[in-house]
Image: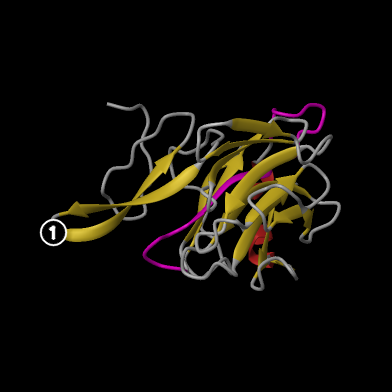
């Protein structure tokens, strides 16, 4: 993020956020604006780089309006928020993935939130689990992204349960795709051309994955 006279870097530490700022003459300063807050994810408003949202381990969503210098509650109190995504089509629309695995949406920049009940009706979600935080084996939404070409298409990565997809803004969700049974740290869209047709290319974090240009087939294992 770049303010008028400085560049700011925000990093989660497990015990809060480290905020590093370099001014226009190259001098660095580092602060810890959220001491003893377990921040698990952050996302910046695509139309206002001063505005940043953070998901916490049990304290819901926080928001900063000054490049991460100060923070205030932004909804979902008491929730474990593991993933956040802001729609590139409407920065007032924010999705929050939680533990146990669920999804909430705000359409007023975090003032109010609604749980997307369709996420609880995903086929085969009964076998999802997470070995990451024993003895709490409950799964959670680890990653979220909204398509840059279609505001209704959303992907969610589950720890541990693969990837699920919505094509109606989160009202309903498809089962996981074949070959995506591992936990994911991130999912994102990119743009590519296949046979002269513009398509969304989906990339995933660890474990490594590839995506052949076949509709609705996201990844194949093993990699070539």
In which quadrant will I find the C terminus?
top left
In this rendering, the answer to whether 37 lies above or below 53 is above
Magenta span: 130-151
Residue 13 image-quadrant placement: top right
In this rendering, the answer to whether 154 lies above or below 156 is below
Magenta part, dominant SS: loop
Is 107 a magenta residue?
no
User: Residue sitting at 78 percent across and 37 percent down?
Assistant: 38
Is 145 a magenta residue?
yes
User: Residue sitting at 43 percent across and 37 percent down?
Assistant: 179
Q: Which residue is mark 1?
A: 196
- Image x and y of residue 56, in percent: 76, 45
Give the residue at the far left of this rendering: 195
Q: Kindly state the secondary structure of the residue where label 1 is placed.
A: loop
User: Residue sitting at 57 percent across and 66 percent down?
Assistant: 170
- Image x and y of residue 35, in percent: 82, 36
In this rendering, the answer to whether 114 lies above or below 160 is below
Q: Is residue 224 visible?
A: yes
Side (left or right) of 17 relative to 73: left
Q: How many marks?
A: 1
Which residue is at the front of the view, 178 or 105?
105
Give the residue at the far front of this rendering: 25
């Amino acid at each position: 993020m770049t303010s008028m006279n400085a560049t700011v870097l925000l990093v989660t530490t497990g015990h809060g956020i480290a905020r590093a700022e370099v001014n226009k003459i190259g001098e660095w300063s580092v602060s810890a604006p959220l001491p003893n807050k377990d921040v698990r994810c952050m996302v910046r408003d695509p139309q206002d780089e001063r505005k940043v949202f953070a998901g916490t381990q049990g304290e819901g969503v926080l928001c900063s309006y000054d490049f991460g210098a100060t923070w205030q509650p932004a909804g979902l109190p008491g929730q474990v928020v593991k993933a956040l995504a802001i729609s590139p089509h409407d920065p007032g629309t924010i999705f929050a993935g939680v533990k146990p695995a669920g999804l909430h949406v705000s359409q007023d920049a975090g003032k109010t939130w609604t749980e997307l009940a369709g996420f609880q009706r995903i086929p085969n979600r009964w076998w999802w689990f997470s070995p990451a935080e024993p003895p709490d084996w409950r799964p959670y939404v680890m990653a979220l992204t909204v398509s840059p070409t279609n505001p209704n298409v959303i992907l969610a990565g589950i720890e541990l349960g693969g990837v699920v997809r919505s094509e109606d803004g989160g009202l309903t969700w498809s089962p996981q795709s074949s070959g995506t049974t591992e936990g994911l740290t991130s999912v994102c869209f990119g743009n590519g051309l296949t046979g002269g047709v513009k398509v969304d290319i989906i990339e995933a974090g660890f474990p490594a994955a590839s995506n052949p240009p076949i509709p609705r087939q996201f990844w194949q294992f093993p990699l070539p």
